Image (cartoon, coloured by chain):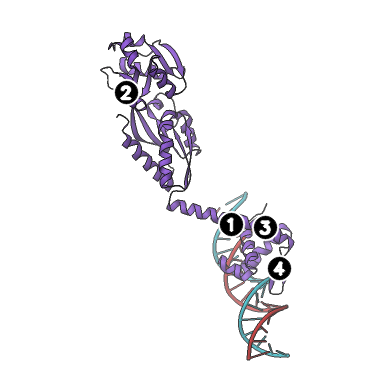
Chain colours: A purple, B cyan, C red
Amino acid sequence: MLQNLGRLKVFYHVFSKGSVLSASKILHVSQSAVSQSLQKLEEEIQSQLFTRMHKRLVPTAAGERLFAVVHPFMQELAGCLKNIKQSREKPFGELRIGAPVEFGKAYFPGMVARFREQYPEVTFYLKLGNPATLLPLVETGQIDFAFVDLFLTQNQFFANLDIYHFSPVVDEEIILACSKRYYEKQIKSDHSFSHLKSQQFIAYRHNAQDVKNWFKHHFNKGNVKYDVVLVVDSQQALISAVKHHAGVGIVASHLVAKEMKEGLIVPIHTPKPKIINQISLVLLQDKVPTLTEKIFQKFLIEKIQSMNLFS
DNA sequence: CGGGAATACTAGGATTCTAG
DNA sequence: CTAGAATCCTAGTATTCCCG
């Protein structure tokens, strides 16, 4: 391997101009420095790159071969540096973002499309997951930033949360809901603990943690056995099951806003305050965001906040 | 043909970088 | 912090080209 890639740059300019003096002017060094660099390079690769013809340098076969490799590299490098410079002036390049699964599925594709109408040079990689998946990716730089669910985060153990910077973006309301028909047949306006706990539950993932959290919050009862009739892997499936009168389930209210407005889905309230799940933007504490990141974060926060998830 | 301009090379010294 | 390596500079030399 070469000890000094800078000599390749010297070689490139000497080859391009066919003269040491011209190359030295481009490189802003003395003619002798260029001459010496060239000699060092030739020594290093143990091949002569130019035949010295009195006042001219004529490339040897080895010189031609080296130039064939160096030339496209230098072109690409110049283009790349230009792009990097541009990305400081206007949004550019790939953004890698993490988001909670349902939140990300529901809103990100649309947001990304709208952002790209304005900034077509920006592309996206979207990683959906819970905080346990997303935070390590933020830490190792595999994603640029993430939106996470703080309500869930508090129930889990993270060794070093202080390396992150959290800024709350939006609150979503977590409700227990069922279809109108199920409500009239089974709930009948009885919102007592003993009545609600005996309902048929649709759970998101196997541990039914969301159901447990809901009862803990509203009735301060932690370790209760629930009758789970269906376990699903996505909120969309859960909402669909609720709509088809399969039972009661925990959802973010904004995901069923339309169904609630139409009266298809009914929220079950208690006198206790609503459960608010806070979604926060999380980035590494000491990371300096790029222009593209800053502009997209601002765009996203404005759009999310203007949606009003409680409507 | 001779002299000036252009270019490449070398020697020696100053400065900067790097590893211990 | 320091010694040695690497790099660059200046000064000077050699060669060739070009024009009067």
**Could you tell me residue A44's position as x and y percent?**
70, 58
Q: Please give the residue where the numbered disc 2 appears in the rendered image.
A: A260
Residue at the image position 61 percent from the left and 64 percent from the top: A13
Label 3 crowd bin: few (<14), some (14–19), many (20+), radius 10 Å: few
Q: Please give the residue where the numbered disc 1 appears in the rendered image.
A: A75
Disc 1 versus disc 3: distance between alpha carbons?
Answer: 11 Å
Q: What mark, if any, has residue A58 been given in the picture? A: 4
Label 2 crowd bin: few (<14), some (14–19), many (20+), radius 10 Å: some
Q: Residue A258's quadrant in the figure?
A: top left
Label 2 or label 1, whichever comes before in sequence order: 1
Q: Residue A116's quadrant in the figure?
A: top left
Q: Indicate the chain on which mark 2 is placed.
A: A
Q: Nearer the viewer, mark 2 or mark 4?
A: 2
Question: Given the image, on which type of amino acid does mark 1 rest?
Answer: Gln
Question: Which residue of the protein is positioned furthest toward the left in this rendering?
Answer: A271
Q: Indicate the chain on which mark 3 is placed.
A: A
Label 2 or label 3, whichever comes before in sequence order: 3
| Contact between labelled residues 3 and 2, with CB atoms less than 8 Å apart | no
